[in-house]
Amino acid sequence: MTDQLSQSEFYILLSLAIKERHGYEIMKQVEQDSGGKVCLGPGTLYGSIKRMLQAGLIKEAAGDNPRRKYYRISDKGRKSLSSELDRYNDAVELAKRENLFQRFGLLSLML
Amino acid sequence: MTSPQSGFSRSERIYAFLLKFYPKSRRQEFGEEMQYVFSESLKDAWKENGRQGAARFWARIILDTGRSALVQHAESLSGGTSMKTIMMQNKNILFIALAVGLIMLIPLTAELVSEDFGWNRSDFIFASTFLFGTGLAFELIRRKSSRIEYRAGVGAALAGMLLLVWITGAVGIIGPESNPANLLYLGVIGVLLAGALVSLLRPRGMALALTATALAQAVITVIALIITPWGLDSFKAFVLNGFFIALWAGSAWLFWRAGQLEPAA
């Protein structure tokens, strides 16, 4: 069983699932993917990057700009992200079956 | 009025200073990247909302720096262990602090409702430090072994020490608490601490240390019975000393059992 990802770790992995990026690109992508709900400051961003490097979820990569440090998702990171997405998917399926979106007035999410 | 360019330069200099709040190793690894992310984000904030956007961005940066610098220092001090793990590993210590806080509510309430209770500030500080110190010592020493016998032995020894100090300080064992003969019990605690130090908390060594502590308590019992006139005081000294001898001996037995069950080194 993999450890549950924190919110920032989840969005960082999500941003790296498509392509390798450097810190600033990750930050912008996270902001965009979360609809502006998750805004990572430089301290939180690189704190998470350090922990994720140590946990083997991401790896350093060679990128287009040699002056920047690029990161890519590792196999372990891909597995973690996929199990997290599975979890979210299961939760959404359950919510649909139990009509929770309607009950909580979240009909817009159904569309 | 300052130009955006000079404002950016000043902001970058301030952020370069704020980076000093992070652990040196993190600064060396990510400082340049963090500075770059800061500069680009500041430009974005300015482009989107001008001065107001920059002000909001700065508010976020200050919060981010304060929070993440603290977390990263904690992680660096614990050899790279994540903050979540640090909290998980030390949750018992947080519970101990909480329990001490709750226990201290009892004398605090008594002090508020009764004029006769008479605890002053130093009494509260001493009591809470002593209780927390004992709890902390138990938590740290118990991690040395997963054996229930060892942990129970540690618990009994620390509980004995706590009670001995408390009882001699509050009511006294030999006569009233003002009787200087009660200071003899410092010797009992000295024997226990010296034994723990020499044995490096190993079970067999601790069994010997606790046996020596029980013997020291027995010697003081004899002295107490000789110097206390026959009556209620000598009965109190006999019962309380007997209780402590039994506690030390019980703790010694638990350590001895833990030593027997431990695989030979």
Image: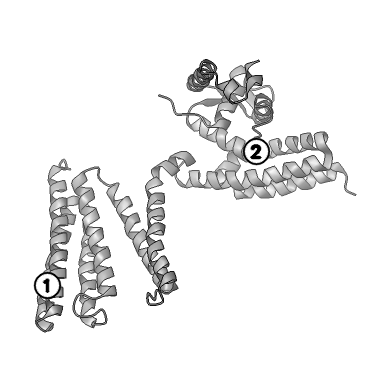
Q: What colour scheme governs how the chains and residues are painted in the rendered image of this protein?
A: one colour
Helix or strand or loop: what does disc 1 sit on? helix
Left or right: B128, with B16 as reference point: left
Which kind of residue does numbered mark 2 sit on? Answer: Pro
Q: Find residue A9 and report its horizontal and vertical position in percent.
A: 55, 30
Question: For residue B85, what is the image quadrant?
Answer: top left
Task: Name above or below for residue A32 compared with residue B159.
Answer: above
Report the quarter where the C terminus of chain A lies.
top right
Task: Name above or below for residue B174 compared with residue A41.
Answer: below
Residue visible at 65% across and 38% down?
A41
Report the quarter where the N terminus of chain A lies.
top left
Question: For residue A60, what is the image quadrant?
Answer: top right
Residue visible at 41% across and 41% down?
B88
Q: Give the labeled residue for mark 2.
A: A42
Q: Tell me if I can see residue B249 in this picture.
A: yes
Q: Find residue A74 and report its horizontal and vertical position in percent.
A: 52, 21
Camera-nearest residue between B59 and A76: B59
Which kind of residue does numbered mark 1 sit on? Answer: Phe
Helix or strand or loop: what does disc 2 sit on? helix
Q: In the current view of this chain or complex, which residue is farthest to the front? A: A103
Disc 1 crowd, CA 10 A, few/some/many (<14, 14-19, 20+): some
Q: Find residue A2 and report its horizontal and vertical position in percent.
A: 43, 25
On whether disc 1 and disc 2 are found on a single subunit, the reply is: no
Residue visible at 38% across and 63% down?
B106
Q: In the current view of this chain or complex, which residue is farthest to the right? A: B1
Q: Find residue B238 and report its horizontal and vertical position in percent.
A: 12, 72
Q: Give the labeled residue for mark 1.
A: B238
Question: For residue B57, what is the image quadrant?
Answer: top right
Q: Chain of mark 1?
A: B
